Image (cartoon, helix red, strand yellow):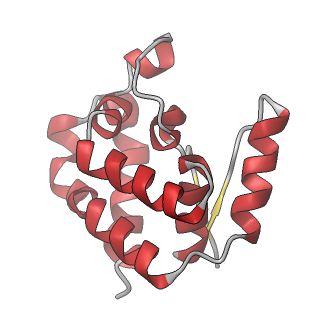
Amino acid sequence: MALQAWSPLDKGALAGRTRADNPARRMDPVFKTVAGDRVLQETLARVAERLGTSRAVVALAWLVAKGAFPLVGARRRSHAESAAEAARLDLPGWAVGELDRASGRYRSLWGRCCSELSWSRVLPGLLQALVFKYILRGI
């Protein structure tokens, strides 16, 4: 059994996009939260700089390192190239650890999903909570 990561870059938030410049981003409370998370954004930027790659590549490689298969939408050639680079990148342990710590607050999504997320995201939120709780934390 394998986990497929739905919206692995959260509408670009994990690639460094922080402006809600279209309806999908404006209506997505998860995008707003992740885009405004300074700790996570700075950690992604620092790891990407140290590895000489982009935030998107680092975020996708982190998912792969956790055993997930990210489903990436590619509107441009550069998107497909980033996905391919992430598949080849063997993320070092220090980077996985930093990203785990920076994303730790999202592992408790289960308790917040119904109060903080809109109903349009409840089902994905519940699934994400189960994934974080049981798979990515390593039961």
Residue 100 vs 54, above or below: the answer is below
For residue 90, side relative to residue 126 (left or right): right
Image quarter of residue 73: top right
Q: Return the residue nearer the eye: 37 or 6.
A: 37
Image quarter of residue 105: bottom left
Q: How many marks?
A: 0
Residue 127, how many percent across, how many down? 42, 56
For residue 26, side relative to residue 60 (left or right): left
Q: Locate the C terminus and report the quarter of the image it occupies.
A: bottom left
Whether residue 11 appears in this view of the structure is yes
Q: Return the residue nearer the eye: 53 or 29.
A: 53
For residue 20, side relative to residue 114 (left or right): right
**Residue at (80% x, 44% y) in the render:** 80
For residue 42, side relative to residue 10 (left or right): left
Q: Locate the N terminus and report the quarter of the image it occupies.
A: bottom right
Residue 27, how many percent across, how many down? 38, 18
Residue 102, how many percent across, how many down? 28, 61
Whether residue 135 appears in this view of the structure is no
Q: Which residue of the protein is positioned furthest toward the bottom in this rendering?
A: 139
Residue 108, how many percent across, how many down? 20, 61
Residue 114 vs 97, above or below: the answer is above
**Residue at (38% x, 35% y) in the render:** 121
**Residue at (57% x, 75% y) in the render:** 91
**Residue at (41% x, 80% y) in the render:** 94
